[in-house]
Image: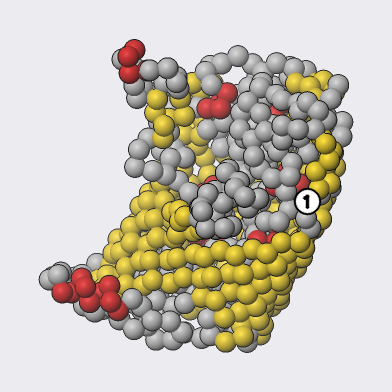
């Protein structure tokens, strides 16, 4: 189905890399007709796309297993360069497809914990403030979407049997801040071409041994994501990712889309640097452990500066730990209050077969510390004449304390399952901690997937209850739900077409989802979208 990057391996060999071999050709692997279990290994998930991303059959468990990437022989390495190009058309509608804004725009600067502190959320879109001009704004309900993803990596085995390697996931990025000539995100003299670039989504190294386990280090999935693998969270309903920020939701303003309430296979979980250990499997069971000191995912410790804009070097304070620094443990800034420290995860998983039935079951716990907020409590918040005192909330958050568990059962190509998530967490933005004095989060997703040869059909339903807007602690909570059916068809090796639908609702009393602030309007919002697309991957 695909070939590995022969030229790169040959170049390395020409440079005299000891023990290196030319990149091996992988034996073509047919698309699976159902999740495959064997000797306690959950080797493939339904509907893989692309077949070899950053996580592969070589680096996702203690023992390498047959799959899309060739398993290296002792003294050799395998180089891969997989990619996917996706083209889609989407039709959307929502409660804010037409939005009328008063003039002048209302601003808020005392809402700790809101994305883009110092302003409210834009509609439509996800910018950090209103448009500057009042009036009526309408969204075009149809759109075309295109993107590319690239997955380079290397897998090697020493002559003593030690396995090791590295893997990367690159995604396309867009700059939507500099419109030019009527073309959004264009910063080029070449018509409507935008300043697209690539950014790193995953980047990690690993060492592994069949007898003692695997250690993964870097920007990569944690225990919750690996154990779920997108299966019990029903993210394989379609190639676009189900309800986890999938493409079918991309054309809808973010304000009215239900944030995915689970850490599994979510950028909020795999986006930071962490150390992960997975044990070998015993009678179908394995365990996982993880530690991350912060939410940092770069070589530097965030923007560790004093936050001033007037010649801080003249004051001798350049680079001090005073603003947006990933190593911050205590801060008077409201924007730091919501950030966790010392994240850890532990879990257990079972994979096996009971006669003709395949079973995947897992449970994991995530905990953390929290930055000690030493600033002032938030003041009363108001919007359009609606005022709610913030007396129920002191501006502080609880450390993360979350249990996630799921199960999936497969028989004759039909997988039925679900995932639950409960604890000190909030859905006012993905994966945010619970504000003190508020309520915790309870969320679940259930669904099915049926695979028969090249056909995959699925349906998922999710529901989440959480505190929501922190300034409404003691006043109201948030209730959200959504559903997502999807179907895809493998036309030929490396080429599939698909269609999916999304519908969702969000509610919180006294919270205006259109403006992201306190208000009596837009307390209930809805969104829906229908998408058709194609994916070519290699």
26 on left or right of 334: left
How far from the left and from the top, in percent, is residue 344?
46, 43
Taking depth in this image into account, of 191 and 363 the one nearest to the observer is 191
Name the residue: 46% across, 34% down. Answer: 341
How far from the left and from the top, in percent, is residue 522?
84, 38
- Indicate how the structure is coloured in the image: secondary structure
Quarter residue 414 falls in? bottom right
Q: Identify the residue under disc 1.
A: 139
Taking depth in this image into account, of 85 and 243 the one nearest to the observer is 85
Q: How many marks?
A: 1
Task: Name above or below for residue 422 compared with residue 242.
Answer: above
Taking depth in this image into account, of 176 and 312 the one nearest to the observer is 176
Secondary structure, mark 1, is loop
Name the residue: 72% across, 35% down. Answer: 131
Task: Name above or below for residue 340 compared with residue 275.
Answer: above
Crowding near pointer 1: few (<14 within 10 Å), some, many (20+)? some
Taking depth in this image into account, of 95 and 237 the one nearest to the observer is 95
How far from the left and from the top, in percent, is residue 310?
42, 17
Q: Is residue 362 in view from this perspective?
A: no
Q: Is residue 56 in view from this perspective?
A: yes
Name the residue: 40% across, 60% down. Answer: 168
Quarter residue 471 falls in? top right
481 on left or right of 454: right
Name the residue: 74% across, 17% down. Answer: 380
Task: Name above or below for residue 309 compared with residue 453.
Answer: above
504 on left or right of 163: right
217 on left or right of 309: left
How far from the left and from the top, in percent, is residue 291?
41, 44
């Amino acid at each position: 189905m695909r070939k590995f990057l022969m030229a790169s391996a040959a170049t390395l060999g020409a440079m005299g890399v000891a023990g290196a071999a030319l990149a091996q050709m992988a034996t073509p692997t047919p698309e699976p007709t159902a999740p495959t279990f064997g000797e306690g290994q959950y080797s493939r998930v339904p509907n893989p796309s692309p077949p070899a991303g950053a996580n592969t059959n070589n680096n996702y468990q203690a023992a390498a297993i047959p799959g899309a990437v060739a398993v290296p022989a002792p003294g050799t390495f395998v180089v891969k360069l997989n990619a996917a190009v996706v083209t889609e058309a989407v039709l959307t509608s929502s409660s804010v497809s037409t939005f009328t804004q008063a003039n002048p725009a209302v601003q808020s600067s005392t809402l700790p914990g809101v994305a883009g502190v110092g302003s409210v959320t834009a509609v439509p879109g996800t910018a950090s403030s209103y448009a500057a001009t009042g009036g009526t704004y309408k969204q075009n309900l149809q759109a075309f979407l295109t993107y590319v993803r690239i997955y380079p990596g290397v897998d090697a085995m020493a002559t003593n049997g030690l396995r090791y390697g590295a893997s990367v996931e690159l995604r396309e990025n867009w700059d939507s801040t500099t419109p030019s000539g009527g073309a959004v995100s264009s910063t080029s003299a070449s018509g409507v071409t935008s300043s697209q670039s690539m950014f790193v989504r995953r980047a990690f190294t690993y060492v592994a041994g069949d007898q003692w386990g695997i250690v993964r280090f870097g920007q990569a999935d944690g225990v919750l994501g690996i154990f779920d693998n997108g299966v019990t969270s029903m993210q394989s309903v379609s190639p676009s990712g189900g309800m986890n920020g999938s493409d079918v939701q991309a054309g809808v303003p973010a304000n009215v889309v239900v944030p995915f309430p689970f850490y599994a296979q979510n950028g909020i979980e795999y986006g930071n640097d962490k150390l992960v250990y997975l044990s070998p499997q015993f009678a179908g069971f394995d365990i996982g452990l993880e530690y991350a000191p912060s939410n940092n995912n770069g070589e530097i410790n965030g923007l560790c500066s004093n936050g001033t804009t007037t010649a801080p070097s003249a004051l001798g304070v350049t680079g001090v730990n005073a603003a947006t620094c990933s190593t911050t443990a205590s801060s008077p800034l409201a924007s730091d209050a919501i950030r966790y420290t010392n994240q850890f995860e532990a879990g257990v998983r079972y994979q096996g077969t009971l006669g003709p039935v395949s079973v995947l079951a897992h449970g994991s716990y995530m905990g953390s510390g929290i930055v000690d907020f030493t600033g002032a409590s938030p003041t009363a918040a108001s919007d359009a004449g609606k005022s709610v005192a913030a007396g129920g909330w002191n501006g502080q958050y609880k450390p993360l304390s979350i249990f996630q568990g799921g199960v999936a059962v497969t028989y004759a190509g039909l997988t039925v399952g679900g995932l639950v998530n409960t604890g000190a967490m909030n859905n006012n933005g993905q994966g945010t901690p619970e504000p003190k004095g508020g309520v915790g989060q309870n969320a679940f997703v259930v669904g099915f997937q049926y695979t028969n040869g090249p056909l995959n059909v699925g349906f998922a339903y999710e529901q989440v209850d959480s505190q929501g807007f922190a300034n409404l602690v003691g006043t109201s909570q948030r209730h959200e739900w959504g559903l997502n059916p999807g179907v895809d068809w493998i036309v030929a090796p490396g080429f599939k077409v698909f269609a999916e639908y999304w519908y969702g609702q969000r509610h919180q009393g006294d919270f205006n989802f259109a403006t992201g602030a306190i208000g009596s309007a837009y307390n209930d919002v809805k969104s829906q979208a229908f998408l058709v697309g194609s994916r070519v991957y290699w």
